[in-house]
Amino acid sequence: MEQTVRTLHTQKHIALVAHDHCKAALLKWVGLNQPALQPHVLYATGTTGNLINRHTGLEVNAMLSGPMGGDQQVGALIAEGKIDVLVFFWDPLNAVPHDPDVKALLRLATVWNIPVATNRSTADFIIRSPLFAGETDIQIPDYQQYLTQRLAR
């Protein structure tokens, strides 16, 4: 598929997601990185977003809870180019009923080439990267070209 460029601006749109067994770890990470997260626009699945807001005071755009469709809402925002970074602390040792939604969310993040952290170490690398604080370009699928080719068949 043809590629095009998308600019991630200085103010990032960041999705924060955590499975139940990982919510405390994400809350701790957000608390430690609150000054770096403050200037950005934050989104989260329902329970996680409400916990972050209550514990840190950060403004969070809360979606539905993950099992109720929140993962899919975040995935839709990614596909629409409205999310720049995904921090998803997931628990690989505990299956959840909405595992297909989790897989779809991670697949969309990969398709649209956004930075994804699935654990604390990777989240630390991303937030400390000079690219996090500045503007950067990423390669994404050229959807208009894709449609043009599909319709020409």
Image (cartoon, helix red, strand yellow):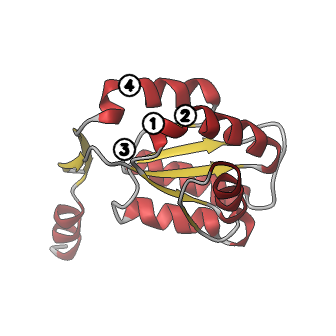
Q: Residue at label 4?
A: 129
Q: Mark 3 Cα within 10 Å, few/some/many (few <14, many 20+)?
A: some
Could you say whether the residue bearing mark 2 is in a helix, strand or loop?
loop
Which image quarter: residue 142?
Answer: bottom left
Q: Which mark is residue 33?
A: 2
Q: In the picture shown, does residue 126 fall above or below 24?
A: above
Q: Which mark is residue 19?
A: none
Q: Earlier in the sequence, mark 1 or mark 4?
A: 1
Label 3 and label 2: CA atoms lie apart by 23 Å
Label 2 and label 4: CA atoms lie apart by 13 Å
Residues at circles 2 and 1 in contact by the CB criterion of under 8 Å: yes
What kind of residue is marked 1?
Answer: Ala
What kind of residue is marked 4?
Answer: Ser
Q: Does residue 63 appear to the left or right of 115 in the view shown?
A: right
Q: Does residue 57 appear to the left or right of 35 in the view shown?
A: right
Q: In the picture shown, does residue 32 fall above or below 12?
A: above
Residue at x 22%, y 50% (from the top left corner): 6
Q: Earlier in the sequence, mark 4 or mark 3?
A: 3
Residue at x 32%, y 34% (from the top left corner): 133
Q: Residue at label 3?
A: 113
Q: Residue at label 1?
A: 36
